Amino acid sequence: MNLPSATACKNNQPTTTAPRLSLACLGVCCLLPILAGCGQTPAATFRPNMVESAKQRLQPEQEQQVATILEAMFGTPDNPVVLPETGLDIAKLRLAAGPVHSDIVGRKNGLFREHCSHCHGVTGDGMGPTAAFLNPYPRDYRPGWFKFKSTERADKPTHADLVTILNNGIYGTSMPSFELLGETKVDALVEYVKYLSMRGEAELSLMRYYFELDDEDEGKLPETRDFLIEEILLPVAERWQEAEDAVIEVPEMPEVDLTESIAMGKELFYGNKANCVKCHGVTALGDGQANDYDDWNKVVKQWSAELQSAHETSTSDMTSEERSEHRAWLAKSDRVLAGDALDPRTIQPRNLRQAIYRGGRRPLDLYYRIHAGINGAPMPAAAGTLSPDEIWHIVNYIRSLPYEFDGELGADRSMVARDRL
Amino acid sequence: MRNRLAGLFWSLLFLAVPVLGVAVFAVAPSIDVWLPKDVSAHGKEIDSLFYFILALTGVVFIVTEMLLFWFIWKYDVAARGEEKATYIHGSHTLEVIWTIIPAVVMLFLAIYQMNAWADVKMRRPVMKPTVEVVARQFEWRLRYPGPDEELGTPDDLFLVNDLHVPVDEDVLVQLKSMDVLHSFFLPNLRIKQDAVPGMKIPVWFKATETGQYDLVCAELCGWGHYKMKGRITIESREDFDAWLEQKYREQEATQPNPQEDML
Ligand SMILES: [Cu+2]
C-alpha cells in the first residue's frame, strides 16, 4: 500500500530540505494504511466440519453442496437467516451476529464475536484462536451436546439453562460470567448459541446423509424444500423445542436429619450401586479413573486411531485408481487432523473437595447432575438405579465433602483444601 | 546558509508542547476524562495528594518546556550568523542546585504522603473479612463468609463479579488470585491492589455513598483482560443484609424458581 511514497522518498536527491521532506514522507507512510481503512478484511465465513467430511469421505463437490445448502438454510456469520421451523428469533440473532459494531440507535451488535468467538470460534466449533491454550477445551456446539442442564441426559438444554451458564460462568473452566452484560444481551447470545448448534447438527446430518443415497442420486442430495426441512432441519429443531417442556421433576428433599442423610450418601458414594468412587476416587479428590475421554475428544481420538490403521492397511489388492483415491483421502485426513481438530485430552473426574461445581452449586443443580448424568462426559445418569431420596443423600454428602476434615488436618481449622495453600 | 524558517519551525514546535499539554489538562474535566467521582472515606486525601503533585510537576513541566523553546529561539544559528558557541566544562554550583532541589522535593513528598499510605496500606481495621475476592482469568469470584463470619464453612455464599458492600462501614476484602497477576481496581473508591497468586492480601475501605460503580482489573492478565469487569454496589446495611439473604436462599435452592414458591 505505502510502496509508491516510499520509493518517492528514496528517489529524492539529497538537498538541504531532504531531512524535512523525508520526515513528511515518513508521516505519509504511517498515515496511508490508516487512510486506506481497515475495511479490507474478508467477510467472516463458517468453517466446514472437516473432521466429519473426511470421516464420511465426502468429495469436494459434495462439501460444496453441503455449504450451499447450509448457507441457504442458515445464512452467513454476518447475515444469519432462519426458517420459522427453527423457532429462533432473528432479531436476537442479528444482535449477536456479524462484526462488532454499533447500529443506528447506538446499540452494540456483534456480541458473539466480541465476547465468545475467540474461544468458541466464529462457527461455534470450539476452535477459536485461544482454544488450544485452554483446558478443558471450549465447547464445540456443532454436535449439539450440552453438559449442564435441567433436562434428561440425551435431551437438549432449555433456553433458561444456557442463560444460567452464561450468567454464572463455569467455575473450574475458562468460561467466565457474562451476567453483567444484562438480560437482553445474554438472551441474544443464548439464541445465537442455539442457532450455531442447530446449524452444526444440520451440517452433520447432511454429511451423513450421503451414505444413504442410492445410485440414482449420483452422489447429490435432493435440494427440495421438503427434504431439507423434513429430513434435516425439523429433527434437530424439534428436539430443541421439546426440551423447554422436558425439565426433570425434582421431588422434595426427604425430611431426614442432615447428618443421617450425609451418612447414607457416603455409603452410597462408596457402594456398588452408585459407585461414585470409581471415577471420583476413594478420597473424592477426582483421582479415580483418569484415562477416559469426553465425547468431543473421543470423536477425534477414535477417528485418528481409525486413520492410523488405514495408514497401515495394505493397498496391494486395490486397483491403481482406488489406490490413488485412498492416498488422497489419507493425505486430506492427515491435514484435517492437524489443522481442524484439537489434540484429544483425557477428562478429569471432578475433585469434590474444592467447593467448585461447574454446573452450579445449588442442591438442585447437583440433583440434576446425578439424576441425568453429564451429557458428553463419562458421568452416567443415576435415575434408573437410584431413588430420588438416594440421590438427595448423595447430594448432601457431596456438599459436605469440602468441609469434611474430621479433625485429622487440625480440629479447629475447618477449611477448604485450597485455603491451606 | 540555513534558513531562518527552520529555526522558527522547531522553536514553535517545542512551544506547542507546553501549550497543548496545559490545554489538555484544562479541557479534560469538562469532557469527563478526569478523576472519577470519589465515594470513599480516604479518597480526599489521595486526590489532594494527586492535585498537589500535579501542580508541582506542572510548574516544572511548563518552566522546562518554555526554556527549551527559548533556547532554540534565541540561539538559532540562522539568526545569530556564524558566531561560535562557547565550550564550558560544566558548572558545579548549578549541578548541586539541580540535584538538591529535586531531592528536597522528593523527600518532602515521601514524608508528606506517609499518612495517606498508612491509611490505605497499614492501618488495617481489626475485623474478619467482609468478603473474599478471588481474581481469575477473566472474572472476579466472590465468597461471603455467611452468618458465622468464617470463610471456608458450609454457610459461605459464592457469587461472581457482582460485589456488594455496606455503606459507611469498614469493609475488609481478602484478595487472592487463582492463576496470574491481576489488580483489584475500584476507581471510585480510590483502591487499587495487585492480586498475587499464592498470597492473601487484605484490602480495606469505607464507602461514603450508595450507588453502583465499576470493579475492573488493572493489570494486563491475558487475552481476555478486557472482559474482567465487575460491579460494586454500595448499599445500606439493611439492603446489604437482605441481598445476602436473598442470594443465599437462591444458592440453597432445592427446587427451580424458589421466588415463585415464596409468592
Ligand atoms: Cu485480570
Image: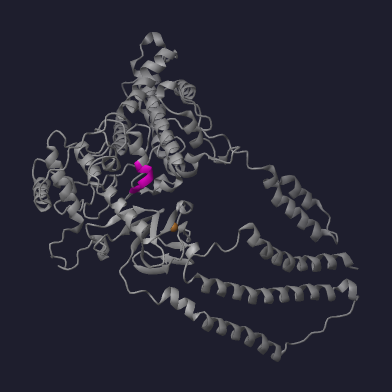
The picture places residue A217, in percent across and down from the top left corner, at 40, 11
Q: Residue at x 44, y 12 (%)?
A: A224
The picture places residue B166, in percent across and down from the top left corner, at 38, 62
Q: Tell me where residue A243 sits by quadrant.
A: top left
- In this rendering, the answer to whether B140 lies above or below B128 is above
The picture places residue A94, in percent across and down from the top left corner, at 51, 33
Q: Nearer the viewer, residue B48 or A88?
A: B48
Which segment is the magenta one?
A: A164-170
The magenta stretch spans residue A166: yes
Toward the top, the furthest residue is A216
Residue A107 as seen in the image, left or right of residue B94: left
Q: Nearer the viewer, residue B130 or A29?
A: B130
The magenta stretch spans residue A40: no
Quarter occupied by the N terminus of chain B: bottom right
Residue B201 as seen in the image, left or right of residue B8: left
Q: Residue at x 40, y 77 (%)?
A: B123
- Magenta portion: prevailing SS class: helix
Quarter occupied by the C terminus of chain B: top left
Residue A87 as seen in the image, left or right of residue A249: right
Q: Residue at x 46, y 44 (%)?
A: A115
- In this rendering, the answer to whether B69 lies above or below A370 is below
Q: Tell me where residue A402 sits by quadrant.
A: bottom left
Residue A233 as seen in the image, left or right of residue A14: left
Q: Nearer the viewer, residue A321 or B113?
A: B113
